[in-house]
Image (cartoon, rainbow, N blue to C red):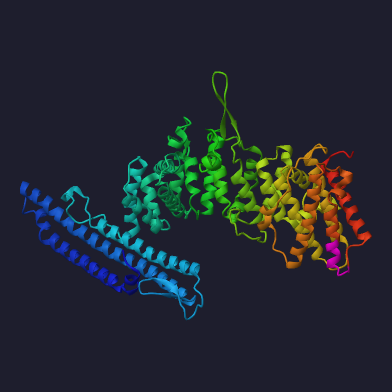
Amino acid sequence: MPTYYEIMSTDLTALTSAAERWDGMAAEFAKQEKAYRRDVHGITIAPSWRGMSAEAAHGRFGVTLTEFQYAQTEAKAIASLLRDAHAQFTELKGRLAAARKEALAAGMRVSDSGRVSADPARVKEADEPAVRSWQDRIDAAVRAVTDADTGVEVALKAAVVDADPLVGGRGFNGRATGDVETYEALAAEGALRKLSRGGHLSRRQLDELERVFRDNSGDEAFSRTLLDDLGPAGTITLTNELNDLIHARGGPGAGTYATIESGLANTLATATRDTHSAWYRHWRTAMRHAGVEHHATDAQGVRLDKAVGYQSLVTLMSKGHGYAPAMLEDLTDDMIAAERSDPGIWRLKGEYSGKRGGWFANDPVDGALGIMSRDPATAAHYLSSDARMKYLMKERDWNVVLHEHGGATVSTYAAGLDGDDRAGFGRALQAATTGIDPSDRHAQYVAHSRQNEAVFKSTVGYLADSGDKFPPSLRQPVASILVNHGATVHASMSEVDISKSPLDQGQLFEVAKQVSKDKDAYGTLNGGLNQAMVSSIHGDHSKSTEPLVRAGRTVGFLEEARIQAQGDPKTATFTAKPLFDKAISYIPVASDDVQAGFDYVTDKWLADEQKRLDEQQTKSNTETFEARNGQLMALADEWHKVQATHGHADFVTRSMVVEASESGAAQATGVSGKQPT
């Protein structure tokens, strides 16, 4: 294991010098081959020597001639391996040197042994977290060199091993290759095959597997060699064994197996990155067969069931990253084709959600969509297809689990929704319509592309058509989507001329109504749209009252959606104050003035909500203004503030916004098709 000092002080040119000498050795073997062929092997085929002795000599001399050829192959391979090692070590040493240079620039000191400390001449008070952070980076760079060094050792040892029975394994290696990663893949494949058969691996073998994946999962040669040896069916079998060790059997080694599984997933991502290659086409074809086969596992065995290949594959993929967009689209299309051909193919007994079962992708189509959501551009491209949206929104059977129903004498199973129904689809919709990865905790609003806008309108249209069959699991994701497109939603809800509304008002009302049936989604939608209304008010300095009127109309539109969502106006559906913190990353970043106005209006809206909940009553259409009175007055105040008038809104302005809310509610009632009472 090389130390920091050894890495920084070693002259790597010795490797290229050695490589040149090995090339020279290959050239010498070539000369010897030529001489041996002419002066020794050649006499066995001369017309002057006939009979059994000539045949025997020809065979023996032929072996020697072959060994001269193998010796050249082996020597050239070692030269290539040494050059490969030089390239790797040079790059990794450069990374270590760069880390050291940046640490020094940040006020750190790095000793000759690689220990990091604060430089007292530049830093008055040592920042221990910062020191640890730089130390971790230095250590990681050293470990990367160690990993590569071990890989080169594995390759050099394997390159000189002759498996040819022609000379009893004691000759030169005629199959030697000059790629370090290929040898590492072959070495890892043996351990992985043993593991997939249920064999026990020593701690040293497990550590080596962790190292080889850590060092090579991003290398195409390594990845394809490994997956070629395993094959699609073998990859699935290995994945199932790893998951049994992690989730079914458990124990202290589960973390190690989880690391190996992640390495395997990243290896798959690397191998399939070039979707135009012949390798990828072959892999995809083979996976279409392995993906629909059933495999016995411990995790499903306790339920007297078997997993389907694609379920295991997507479970594996969820642990990796960096998948090619076309690969994700191809895989999802292939799985949809499989379920069209064999309806109910994914149905397994019991729940597969939550902490105990959510790790397994029992609905691989939904799982693949969830993986796709990590790349918003890919999700947008995939869902911009109307055929795909139609299938996922209207045609697909989402009843992917078999729920047990106990009877007097025998239990029966009925197909139903899983506990994480459409979780992946919901995230994919969010990514496709907003351009934001929903799993990114630090995500910020991004400008919408044409595809984002197209998928958004398609989503509203299909969900509006679903009516009361609107999937409950999509209410929260759709609320975040509507807030993200707040300006368009506000412009549509507040438009007097229906023909000029950016979105179909009837469709938008139906979606808002269905979203409002969930208290958290309701809070996200209503609270988040406050920013769109406040932003519109702040964006107009013409003294026009239009922004205020529009805000009032949107408030009324939203309130009517809530009323119709709750059904019986005498029943208080929502029992807790709604929250909308889940949508913060989906709201456009605002100026300080807009943010202050948003906070002010939202506080008043929350007060209205709390009052309504405390009174345990809901309001009819004619009382919309009372349910949102505080919010409406706050919007009027905000309009006055922007127009640089003194004091609070006057009576006329307050009356205007209240009337606008009543008008908005009335229009919402009209587009909803509900008869006025």
Locate the N terminus and report the quarter of the image it occupies. Answer: bottom left
270, 618: nearer the viewer: 618
Q: Assess whether residue 640 is covered by the magenta stretch.
A: yes
Locate residue 450 relative to residue 372 in the image: left or right.
right
Residue that lies at the very extreme toward the right in this rendered image: 652
Q: Locate residue 109, reporting x and y percent.
A: 43, 76
Q: Nearer the viewer, residue 58 or 509?
A: 509
Question: Can the viewer see residue 495?
Answer: no
- Where's residue 571, x and y in %? 80, 37
Magenta segment's dominant SS is helix
How many numbered circles does the render carry?
A: 0
User: Looking at the image, which residue is at 73% across and 67% down?
Assistant: 592
Q: Which residues are magenta?
A: 637-646
Q: Position of residue 605 (x, y in %)?
A: 79, 53
Quadrant of the rendering where the C terminus is positioned: top right
Residue 239 % position (x, y): 43, 44
Taking the image as shown, residue 672 lies to the left or right of residue 12, namely: right
Image height of 674 relative to 479, above or below: above
* View extreme (front): residue: 125
Q: Which residue is painted at 86% across and 42% down in the image?
A: 620
Give me the residue at 19% from left, 64% from top.
30
Q: Nearer the viewer, residue 668 or 45?
A: 668
- The residue at the point 83 percent across, 44 percent down is 671
